[in-house]
Image (cartoon, grey):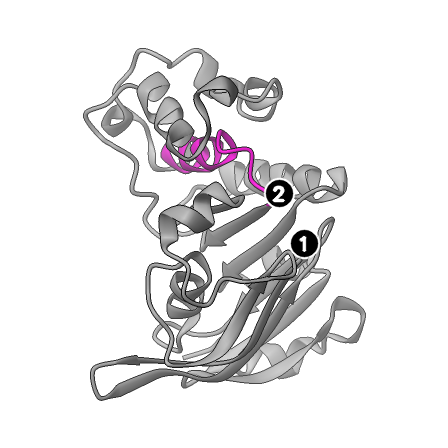
Amino acid sequence: MLQVDNIDLFYGASQALRGVSLTARPGQVTCVLGRNGVGKTSLLRAIVGQQAIQGGSIQWEDRDITKTASHARARAGIAYVPQGREIFPFLTVDENLRSGFAALPRSERRLPPETFKLFPVLQDMLDRRGGDLSGGQQQQLAIARALAMQPRLLVLDEPTEGIQPSIIKDIQRIIALLRDRGDMAIVLVEQYFEFARDLADSYIVMDRGEVVLSGQRSGMVETDVRRYLTV
């Protein structure tokens, strides 16, 4: 479904990505691991079209989207939950959810039936402002907003950051349920090893803008991966 081939990305004279490749398939979670500042977020921004690449290619459903604008990628079924959530603090929960409709034709602008089954806490908070929610509730709102787009690829940037353990378990359960439906590919950036290990079908580990380890979950060696996660 998604094939990232040998991409390079620069910020001015500084190279953030060097020959990075990644594959994401429906019904699977592809995890991207690494310390802060190694290029994980840059990779996601390249996938969703928020940052242009200078080398390599990105294929989505057998179509080259290397130079496709971010809004067109959203309409093609790619949803992004950025680090820090970036919900609209002065809009209500309901308005935040409906902002996810922007990429859909008017005839399809309705919340997926499972929204409040996955995120029951949001149903009781529809009239509350997003900024009044806890960090964990805001993260759930950000994921639910992305799912309102009815995506076929969900891209998540560190969904456990700053979240209490009980909500982390809820988010892990939700990602597993979405994967197990079989119709969605998921790319997950994470630093929390146990969270990533338990969800990953495949993984890459990045260091200094490059992929230094990759493979299937069955072949993941914890000591090798952790070496690139510790400061």
The answer to which of marks 1 and 2 sits earlier in the sequence is: 2
- Magenta span covers which residues? 138-152
Query: Where is mark 2, residue-wise?
Result: 175
Q: Tell me if I can see residue 6 in this picture.
A: yes
Give residue 215's mark: none
State left or right for residue 177 relative to residue 120.
right
Tell me where residue 55 sits by quadrant: bottom left
Residue at mark 1 to residue at mark 2: CA–CA distance = 8 Å
- Taking the spot 45% from the left edge, 55% from the top edge, the residue there is 158
**In the image, residue 38 above or below residue 110:** below
Q: Secondary structure at mark 2?
A: helix
- Residue 146 lies within the magenta run: yes
Give the residue displayed 64% in from the left and 67% down from the top.
23
Left or right: 125 in relation to 79: left
Which amino acid lies under the numbered mark 1 shown in the image of this protein? Leu
Q: Residue at x 49, y 62 (%)?
A: 65
